[in-house]
Structures are given as structure tokens and as C-alpha cells.
Image (spheres, helix red, strand yellow):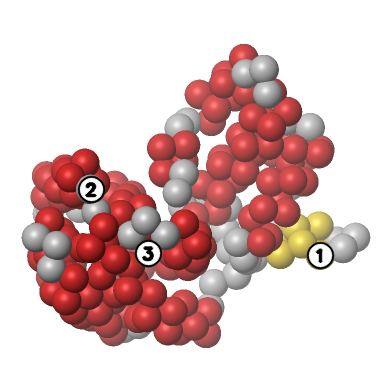
Amino acid sequence: MAVATARMTPTTLISAARKSPAAARMRGDLAYHVLRGKILRLEIAPAALINEAELMATLEVGRTPLREALQRLCRENLVVILPRRGTLVADLNLSDLQKVSEMRRELEPFAARLAAERATPAQVAAMQQNLRDTDALDGAGDYRQLIELDARAHALLAEAAHNEFLSELLERMYNQVLRLWYVGLHRVGRLPEAIAEHHELVSAIAAHDADAAQAVMRRHVAGFEKEFLKVV
């Protein structure tokens, strides 16, 4: 998962793209990561038409790198390309949330089991640090930062499962959920319980208790889904 790259600012990515000997590929990555971030954070609204000319000017990339980025985002179901009409940001709807939730209920507990069996000490340490960062925000009302840390937690879990095919599925699935988090997370009343479950999960992974990790994640996904459906 490209967690570190996704955190880079547009200015940093533009500078890197100019200096890299593989500049063409870097420009494509630049367009992809910046545009993806804007879509996930709702800086470009669901169902909005993407202004390609404006993006090309803002990101200082050509039409080809931008089109390549849009194709990648289309494969991730974040945009819809309409021939001769343009590209739209994929809309949000409850039907999609329900479909993604069906996948989460099966895949994330399985990933938690694998992580408990396979996580390295360094990966466990990274999860524990992410929990400390989350605890430091607890009660501060910084929902944007909380969402980023939650995304980081799920990315670390997927990485610790040591199955690149599963990781790819989880990332694409979580991207669909992430936009909904930005819409309604501030109204969800279950955040303390969710954070406590993250602690339980990391403890189970650190103890290599696969059964416990799977059970905690199953409860976490089901509880958050039930609560979230009340507010969207």
C-alpha cells in the first residue's frame, strides 16, 4: 500500500517528478496520488465532473499522465469515464456501502488472522505507534487526522498479512469506505469503542493469537457498520 506516498504534499511530489530520471512515470504517479487524495477527502465532490485542463495546470502534468491516472482511478471505482463526455467522480450511495460491508465482514477478519500469524516485530511496533498517535487525538475532535490514522491502521494490518493479493483487495475496498468516513464520521457515537477495539486487535496480533484477532475484527467491522448506517 502506498501510504507514505499518499501523505506527500502536491508540492513535494511535483518537485520529485521534476528531478527524477524517470520523470514521465513520476508525473503519472503525481497525478494519481494527488487526485486520489482529493477524491478520498471529498475535496472533489462525489458525482462532480473532473476539470482536466485545470488539473493539468495545477499539477503541471500533460494530458497523457493525467489520463493514465484517471484510468487507474477508474479501475479502483473512484471515477467513471464517460466516452466523449468526460470523467466523473464516482457517486456515493448506500447500495455500494452495503456491498463493501459484505466484503469487509469476510476479508478484514481473515486479514487480522493472517496478521496475527505472520506479523513481524517491526510491523507490530508500527501498529502500536499508530495506536499511541490515535490516543493522543482522542477527544480532540480532529476527525480528519483520526480518519488518516484509521486508514494507516488498516494499511498496516493488510501489510502484516503478507498477502499482496489480499492487500490490494483491502485497499480498493477501504477507499470506498474512506469517503463515507469523511461524510459522517463526526456524527458516529461509537468512536471510543472502535479505538478500544483497535487496541484489542493489536494486542492479539502482538500475542500471535489468530482466533482473538479474527474475533475482534469481526466485532469491529459489524459494530461500526451498524452505527454508521444510522447517520448516513
Q: In this image, 20 relative to 175: left or right? A: right
Residue in the image at 29% along x and 66% along y: 114
Does the rendering let one see residue 155? Answer: no
Q: In this image, 151 relative to 113: left or right? A: right
The residue closer to the viewer here, 91 or 204, is 204
* Residue sitting at the far front: 117
Q: Which callout, 2 or 1, points at the residue further toward the start of the chain?
A: 1
Residue in the image at 77% along x and 46% along y: 67
Pointer 1 residue: 82
Pointer 3 residue: 181
Percent x, y of residue 49: 71, 57
**From the viewer's perspective, is residue 167 above or below residue 61?**
below
Disc 1 marks a residue whose amino acid type is Leu
Pointer 2 residue: 120
Mark 1 neighbour class, 10 Å CA radius: few under 14, some 14 to 19, many 20 or more: few
CA gap, disc 3 to disc 1?
27 Å
Disc 3 marks a residue whose amino acid type is Trp
